[in-house]
Amino acid sequence: MVKTATHITEVVEDDLLEKWIKTGRRHAEAFQKRAYITQVLELSLDTWPSMPFEIPRPPLQQVDSIKYYDVDDVEYTLDLNTIIQVDTASDPGRIGLKNLQTLPTTTLRSMAAVKIRFTAGYGSAETDIPEDVQDAIMLYVTWRNENRAAEDSLPEHVKNLLRPNRV
């Protein structure tokens, strides 16, 4: 479909198209502050967050682990099933404390004391990405083909397609 939109018929340009698609996706993800393709991410915090806490880079699929480190750099893993409630239905997703639960009172190290590992994205295939985002990426690729010497950033008309669902 991209080859048709860009009017590229040469097989030698396939690698260039793939590069532009990946670059367009990365730019669009950064602009919208979302994860499109399923990916495991890690958020590093200096202290425990206030609860409920929004997990960045929606859509949230799951929270894989929450680890924390004391002043002696000893690593602990929070029991997600007992203490944490995960809300994947909200956009962005959130974590909160289950009823009557509290966070550990261990004295934390001063930096990067809490690490939240999570999985985010619409799915594992490019077809899982919302159609309006796919259209924006295709528009970016077409623009790159027509403006090969242009700087590598999202043009305003592509941003306009992405703006409504920006976090």
Image (tube, helix red, strand yellow):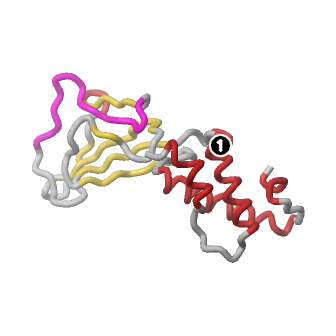
Residue in the picture at 57% in, 66% down: 153
The magenta segment: 90-105
Image quarter (top left, top right, bottom left or bottom right) of the C terminus:
top left
Seen as rendered, the residue at the extreme top is 99
Counting from the top left corner in percent of width and height, residue 143 is at 70, 63
Q: Is residue 43 left or right of residue 78?
A: right
Residue situated in front as seen by the camera: 149 or 51:
149
Q: Secondary structure at mark 1?
A: loop
Left or right position of 150 against 39: right
**How far across and how far down the image is residue 147, in percent?**
71, 70
Q: Is residue 157 above or below residue 99?
A: below
Identify residue for label 1.
Answer: 125
- The count of marks equals 1
Q: Which residue is drawn at the image coordinates 10% and 42% (left, top)?
A: 105
For this orientation, the residue located farthest to the bottom is: 149
Image vertical order of residue 91 relative to residue 15, above or below:
above
Tell me if mark 1 has few (under 14), some (14-19) or many (20+) residues whose alpha carbon lies within 10 angstroms of its own. Answer: few
Q: Among all residues in the image, which is located at the extreme right?
A: 9
In the image, taking residue 119 as reference, residue 72 lies left or right, namely left
* Residue in front for this viewpoint, 34 or 113: 34
In front here: 98 or 139? 139
- Amino acid type at circle 1 is Ala
Q: Quadrant of residue 103?
A: top left
The residue located at (85%, 62%) in the rendering is: 8
Does residue 78 show up magenta in the picture?
A: no
For the stretch drawn in magenta, what is the main secondary structure?
loop
